[in-house]
Image (cartoon, helix red, strand yellow):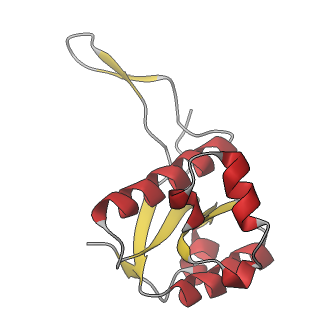
Amino acid sequence: MNQDFSKRFAIVVRHDLEPWQITNVIAHIAAKLGRVVEQFDTGDYFTMKDGFSMPRNSQYPIIVLRVGFSRDLQALLAAVQAAQLPYLAFVREMLDFNEDEKLQEALSKKDASEVEYLGIGMFGENQEVKQLTKGFDLWK
């Protein structure tokens, strides 16, 4: 199968979080978005000279960007929703609760404008994703 270079993942994360929180946010967003892509990879394995095989990674680039404030993520979320791209918004309560039932209970008591956004991930056409994320810096 030929590799598709027309799409990408982008994950925008607040840079003021603890390192463990940053990795948790990125991991959850990547796991969720990886499930929505029909042709995630270009085959089953990469095989080495000695016959060792390892599963292939995503055929699409995963770009991680940084942002300073939750309000910037709220604005990005609105734009991603308007573009109708697959996405995941990761909020503080997702770190605070490890049971979905308790998480749902906590979120049901708040409006979307009241939660603290920690990260937003999306998947889409390169140019559209670049346009949506153009104001954010590459995580270095």
> Where 43 falls versus 23 (above or below)?
above
Q: Residue 90 at x, y = what percent? A: 58, 64
In the image, 103 versus 5, the foreground residue is: 103
Instruction: Classify residue 105 as left or right of residue 61.
Output: right
Q: Residue 19 at x, y = what percent? A: 29, 63
> Where 91 falls versus 113 (above or below)?
above
> Where 111 falls versus 29 (above or below)?
below
Please identify the quadrant where the C terminus is shown.
bottom left
Task: Choose top left, top right, bottom left or bottom right for residue 128.
Answer: bottom right
Task: Choose top left, top right, bottom left or bottom right for residue 85.
Answer: bottom right
Res 79 visible: no
Q: Residue 117 at x, y = what percent? A: 57, 75
Instruction: Classify residue 10 as left or right of residue 53.
Output: right
Task: Choose top left, top right, bottom left or bottom right for residue 137.
Answer: bottom left
Please identify the quadrant where the N terminus is shown.
top right
Q: Residue at x 72, y 66 (%)?
A: 107
Q: Residue 5 at x, y = what percent? A: 53, 55
Q: Residue at x 74, y 78 (%)?
A: 112
Q: Residue at x 36, y 73 (%)?
A: 17
Question: Residue pushed farthest top?
Answer: 51
In the image, 62 versus 107, the foreground residue is: 107
Question: What is the total number of numbered labels drawn onto the structure image?
Answer: 0
In the image, 85 versus 18, the foreground residue is: 18
Res 111 visible: yes
Q: Residue at x 55, y 88 (%)?
A: 72
Instruction: Classify residue 23 as left or right of residue 91.
Output: left
